[in-house]
Amino acid sequence: MDSGGSGLRLALAADGGPALTWSTPVPVETGARGIDAGAFLDRMLPAARELLRRAGSRRCEAVCVGASGMSTLGRDLRAVLPGALREALGVHRLALASDAVTAYAGALGQRPGAVVAAGTGLVALGTDLTPDGGWRRADGWGASARRLRQRRLDRAGRAGSGDARPRRPQRRLRTAAETAGSRLRSGR
């Protein structure tokens, strides 16, 4: 399961068969305790039950939830999901992690490297997997996100006045990856 600013996505892998998927572009609400576990479950459980039905199963052995802001906004998810998923889906093993961690694991597994995830936010996570190297993380919140939003607004304003100078998406992605890479190398 992946929950972030661009929505909620589920994938179910059942005994070597093809992955079954479901998604919605509507993000899960946040409240006083961070990401709202009740809203997450209300949206996710019907979809998970349908995927299980399509797979011919009634329970899910293991679940991994990658959520944007899990470390800072995941208090409600950490408190509620273990019991709720065990009761509703029969989950025996549960991993709760930041979406940056699950993106890394999905892309690189147990190999050294770096992953840049760009959606409504931007996060980069990397490691050389050595005892001295550790992990490095850089994200797109704060001043850099404000600058990016301002540039997009300025560009949109120029486009409306006929003064747009569009840049290719590949160049923007390369620039974001290079910026994240330099932040990871510098430890910022």
Image (cartoon, helix red, strand yellow):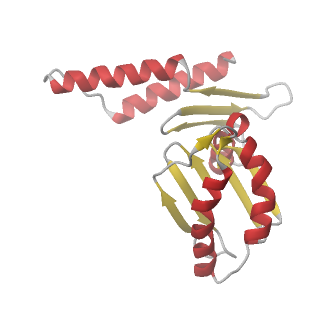
Q: Is residue 150 visible?
A: yes
Query: Of all residues shown, which one is farthest toward the front?
Result: 32
Q: Residue at x 66, y 15 (%)?
A: 186
Quadrant in which the N terminus is drawn: bottom right
How far across and how far down the image is residue 74, in percent?
A: 71, 42
Does 31 appear above or below 173?
Answer: below
How many marks the image carries: the answer is: 0
Q: Which of these two is toward me, 186 or 99?
A: 99
Q: Which of these two is toward me, 159 or 81?
A: 81
Location of residue 61 (image quadrant):
bottom right
Q: Which of these two is toward me, 76 or 156?
A: 76
Q: Residue at x 64, y 84 (%)?
A: 56
How far across and how far down the image is residue 183, in percent?
A: 61, 19
Does 175 appear above or below 129?
Answer: above
How far across and how far down the image is residue 55, in percent?
A: 62, 79
Q: Is residue 165 visible?
A: no
How far across and how far down the image is residue 81, in percent?
A: 75, 55
117 on left or right of 155: right
Query: Of all residues shown, which one is farthest toward the left?
Result: 162
Does 151 appear above or below 61?
Answer: above
Quadrant in which the C terminus is drawn: top right
97 on left or right of 18: right
Q: Residue at x 13, y 24 (%)?
A: 162
Query: Of all residues shown, which one is farthest toward the right?
Result: 131
Location of residue 18 (image quadrant):
bottom right
70 on left or right of 168: right
